[in-house]
Amino acid sequence: MRRSPDRYNAFMNDNIRIPIVSGRFYPNEPEQLRDVLCELLGVTEDSQALPMPSSRGIIAPHAGYIYSGGIAAKGFLEVAQAGRPDVVVILGASHTRVGPWFALSPHLEWETPLGRSPVDPDMMARLFEEGFAYEAASFEREHSIEVQLPFIQHLWGTTMPIVPICVSPAPLVRIQDAAKGLIKALGVHKGLVIASSDFTHFKPNSEARSADTAALGHILDLDVQGFRQLCQVKQLTICGPTAVEVLMSVAANESWTATRMLGYATSGDVTGDLSSVVGYASVLMTKENYG
């Protein structure tokens, strides 16, 4: 059921986070959405029942599925082939920059046309103890986490627990603290950590690809300082750089040093307009020999 705009403010007091880009970024009708996901992923819901052998991370884009869905699917498929995670942490980009650096969703469930995903209460409580803060306003008009959910629900069902975190620009020392807190909160659980981010925005195709190649070089090397310096000096328009930095810091601390580019494209590949594009990348971070 499509929600009316007046739900934007109402959902803040609810236990359920209502979707805000359903029908725009992805289909609002469940069957249409399942068809799109089957086309992108080529698998049915909850097809991977074996446990994932080790925690890992991916960078996934969050634009409309017509533009970035194929790139996002590459990361999710790579993880699904390794097995089923215990929990999925979604580090969302903060487009509004409302709220604290690392905001926890206070909602008990997140809804999409496919159903409702439960928020992991124990892990949220542990993150709160590590200095993360609950703030509903950070999620009010933020789509970067929501857009990842249908992929998760399609692959592992609506019982898969999630940990939604909205990440705003923060000092590097706080990035490291957040990464250590997240690692501690995960504990022995085999988690998938997603950094939700699109790359260069509204530049000519050749310029966007060049800038993103440079940024991805630092990401693949898990070079957080080099990545941040490049973003600042070149004034890169990556929309989720801090979420990416948290994931890179977790990866470096957890020896997820087997980094791999899974795919890259720009909106120009879909529209044919190369004068002003947005870049999308899929990156895998895992331990050696765990694929």
Image (cartoon, rainbow, N blue to C red):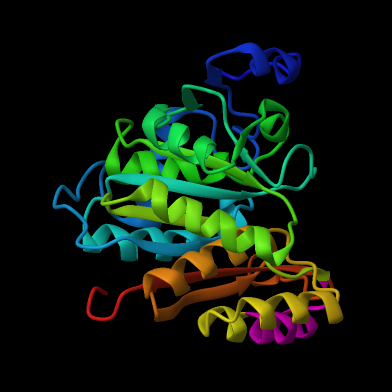
Q: Nearer the viewer, residue 159 or 56?
A: 56
Q: Is residue 118 above or below residue 281?
A: above
Of helix, strand and loop, which mostly describes the magenta segment? helix
Q: Is residue 266 above or below residue 111?
A: below
Image quarter hosting the C terminus = bottom left
At a point 47% along the width and 51% down the height, the residue shown is: 182
Image quarter hosting the N terminus = top right
Q: Which residues are magenta?
A: 203-215
Q: Quadrant of residue 136?
A: top right
Q: Nearer the viewer, residue 77 or 102?
A: 102
Q: Quadrant of residue 172?
A: bottom right
Horizontal side of residue 190 vs 280, given as left or right: left
Horizontal side of residue 19 vs 109, given as left or right: right
Residue closest to the far left: 50
Q: Quadrant of residue 87?
A: top left
Where residue 45 appears, x then y in whole percent?
A: 27, 41
Where residue 101 appears, x then y in whole percent?
A: 70, 47
Where residue 196 appears, x then y in whole percent?
A: 58, 55
Q: Is residue 228 above or below residue 18?
A: below
Q: Nearer the viewer, residue 290 or 78?
A: 290
Residue 37 in sight here: no
At a point 38% along the width and 58% down the height, the residue shown is: 76
Q: Is residue 237 above or below residue 210?
A: above
Residue 82 in sight here: yes
Is 29 included in the stretch rendered in magenta?
no
At a point 68% along the width and 68% down the height, the residue shown is: 199
Q: Nearer the viewer, residue 41 or 107?
A: 107
At a point 59% along the width and 41% down the height, the residue shown is: 132
Where residue 146 appears, x then y in whole percent?
A: 56, 39
Horizontal side of residue 149 vs 233, given as left or right: left
